[in-house]
Image (spheres, rainbow, N blue to C red):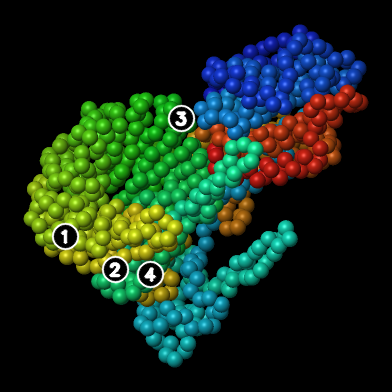
Amino acid sequence: MSISAGSSTASLLSQTSLIASSPYTQEKNPYTGKVTYVYNAPAPVSIDSSTLISLLSEGITGTSSSSSSASSSTAPVAPWESESTAPQQSALVQAVTNGAAFFNPSSAQLAAPAGANQQDYEGLFALYQGLNAMEGLATAAASTTASSSQQAAYQATFAQGMTQLQAYLSSDAFKNIDVSYGAATASQQSTEGATVETDNYTTQPLAIGSNNTPVTAFGGQVAFNIQVTSLNGTTKNVAFNLNDMGTTPRTLSNVVSYLNSQLSSAGVSTRFADVMNPGAAQTAQINGQTQTISTEPNTYSLEIVGTPTEQITLSAADSTPAVYLTGTQGAPGQTTTTIAPSTTGAPTISTTTGPSDVTQILAKYNGASDAVATSPSDGVVSNTTVAGSPTDVQATATGPDGSVYVLADIDGKTADGQTINGTSDVALMKYDSAGNLLYTRTLGAANAASGYAIAVSPDGSQVAITGTTTGPLDATDPSQAATATTGFVSVYSTDTGDEEWTQTQSQPEGTTQTPTAVTFGSNGQVFVAGTATGQLLGSGSPSGTQSSYIQGYSGQEVTAADGTTSWVSSSTFTNQFGSGGTNTPAGVAVSGNTLYEAGAENGNVVVRAYTLQSSGAPVLAATTNLGALQGGSVAGISVAADGSVIVAGSTENGALAGTVGQAYTGGEEGFVATLSSSLTPNTVDYVPTSSNFSATSMTTSNGEVYLAGTLAQAAQAGQTTGSAGYVAEVDPTSGQVLWSRTQQGVDGIDAPTSVAVSTVGASSSLDALGLPTGAIDYSQSTNVIAATSVRAGDQFQVQVGSGLPTTITVQEGDTFASLAQEINFATGFQADATTATVNGKTVLKIAPTNSNNSVKLIAGATGQDALAPLGLRPGLLTDDADNTTASGAAEKSSTTGRSVLGLVLPDAMNISTTAGASAAATALQLSIAKVENLFQDLSQPASTTPSTQKPLSATLQTYYSNQLANYQLALQRLG
């Protein structure tokens, strides 16, 4: 963690992380003689001013005129009064569009009344004018006639205003007023936190309604073992067999009693318990009020009550392979267009979209069940919705311990409540074999990100993911444009989910790269394959309209002299290749010092082998073209235990290279091809299906190939398409289908995206009890970066009173406790930052040390802010936060004599869309009303001149407050 603070306003404005470049110069007010710092705006944003003015013309008038000075014995004329000569909104908007500063106290050419503070009047005047200009931009962008390009131009100017607003509020613009971006509160507590470690493990619900009713799943042979290892290394094995219960009904309560009797007899401390999960209330709106109409039945789960001194590992003699199928089910909401005739003009056309049925599914099958399903539930262990309602599930992989890793795209909060930074992000989720979510980790992209591929290291200690980001992942990286798309690869520790290293590769303008596959090599190596348009840095010449590439990375953990460890990583090579036309790699695999890649090159199945070098790019050793896909696809590549290479996918070509075993029967069918280690074609087998089959994913386990994809089927009524999910286990030596399942989805739509297999993931006994295979790991990461969407280097500022803001930078390894310590140290212990446990999470709480202090939290720069992903808001922390007048302005503090004004602006505002612009305009209107109220409260006696723009009434303030609350979620998602 690093802390930086300037020694003057000028140094603050040049050093603060809130602005990329914001030089201020001194300017003397000719009317008051006061010297202020004036913002030197960056180059004007190109925009059609006439279009902007026309959008503002309805209801917004006024022109810029010469200034005048008010009498020193009466209140100055407010800028919204009818006789004010200050520039009105349309002129302000035009000025900032042409590069003028949003906030300029020197423009307040007025004199304060006797006994009043001139600086505060000028500061409020400048604050009002700047907010007024921003509200005008938002109103223009919210217009139904504003095009997307116009909205983008408005947003570019608006973003400059946001940066200047943060800088202005952290400057010394006010003498006796504390103004903050957000609300004024006595303290703040983060809504994000690190999960507190417990020694308990709770299963999914096993019983409904009562824990004393026999559970069907407990019938038959249910037997398993627990190995208990103490801290001194002593192990005890405890065997369980529900048949030992004899005629005792197998209720959850009775089973718990039996299990505990076995543990007690073995002399171990770990115990089982049953836990009630209260049924959810079903509500409805009746006469405008929420009424509970029914309550779902309570459910009951099994819980392991462990101890810190015992490590337990579960196993069962009936363990079998588990097949995991992920993908999309259901149809999107149907859009209906209605045309209403009109007798006076053109008809009214309106469209409505119904609710969507689309969900992302994680299905688990017992791979030892019947080869062909005898019923829809045959072999189905579970079929659940992926946690957090992601928009897409892109890939899955399993670890040696039976864990399942899911890579998904998300556009909202994660299942454990993490808030993402931009409009979308990548989520890595770890499940145990029983389907319990162990953790979720987000990439922390500033703008948008998508994931595409995942791999687990051979020893199971690391998991790698790859995908793309829009804009720089690191906001301080000047080499990547905000709209550029580039690839990334991140490696995490599998046990805690802590990020070990991440690499991105900036590309020349106009060049894009999309990773499609990732795998581990030896000695910390990671290899990525993907597609690219244009020439990648450090690569050969591109081939075709869309070329393929492979990249190598290396990551190592190093130990410093003081004993601390950290990870260092680097890109080792980039190799671009392909045939003419479109090239799309489908997979990469490593065997010894050979890297294999397979994909579609100009419509053909092409496999390449590269010899890895001790340094630099690998050398191409062999290339084999297996033939035309004829509309099919390559699903992936793997290396068998004997060194042979396996490639699988789907095709309509019945004459792919190799000796045919299972013959092609027609249409699009799956295929499994084998090649020698030098890529000589050996065999090719086709997988016959009841209808056209399109492969999307493949994996291998214990020498068998698992191929997944979609089967074409007729669309259901009201739908335009239909498909079923399909997965098959194929013997690559004979082409025989050993096991298969067809999966139906809601609305007749099921589309698998990935298949993964665990050799020990299924057990009839452990699955019946909702228990996982392997060791129960109670540990949780305390790392801030792991627990939130914060990335290393993200920042926020803390300002005590009228002092200079201090920058807090989150570093790798920071915990919530260390973050609290750094805040206290940075503020000279004038802020009281502590941690607390709330709802099972360690959170951060910040307050002033005493009533004589106020603490202001200031957001970091766009793309580098740590406040929002921590669940904190920009705002003022003061004991006087609740002392407000009826008009909305703050009373003077009894201890500091200063007024408190919280603007209550949202964490982020973006006006590049109509919804975002409307939300921003509403928020700014409420804040402007607060400024007006405080300005009038300072004016005694207040001006009695009729106003053309009066402060909002209490009713309107309530309305805008409600509207602001409604828009908060939209603003978060719009970024």
Residue 459: x and y in percent read: 29, 54
* Residue at image location 79% in from the left, 10% down from the top: 31
Q: Give the alpha-carbon distance from disc 3 to disc 2, as whole Å.
A: 46 Å
For marks 3 and 2, the one nearer the N-term is 2
The reply to whether the C-beta atoms of the residues labelled 3 and 2 are less than 8 Å apart is no
Q: Is residue 469 above or below residue 835?
A: above
- Nearest the viewer among 569 and 22 is 22
Where residue 360 sits, quadrant-wise, is bottom left
For marks 1 and 4, the one nearer the N-term is 4
Residue 488: x and y in percent read: 37, 38
Q: Residue furthest front?
A: 343
In terms of secondary structure, where does tag 2 sit?
A: loop
* Residue at image location 17% in from the left, 65% down from the top: 736
Q: Give the alpha-carbon distance from disc 1 to disc 2, as whole Å.
A: 26 Å
Q: Which mark is residue 665?
A: 1
Horizontally, is 343 left or right of 152 in the view?
right
Q: Which residue is mark 2?
A: 367
Q: Which residue is mark 3?
A: 482
The reply to whether the C-beta atoms of the residues labelled 1 and 2 are less than 8 Å apart is no
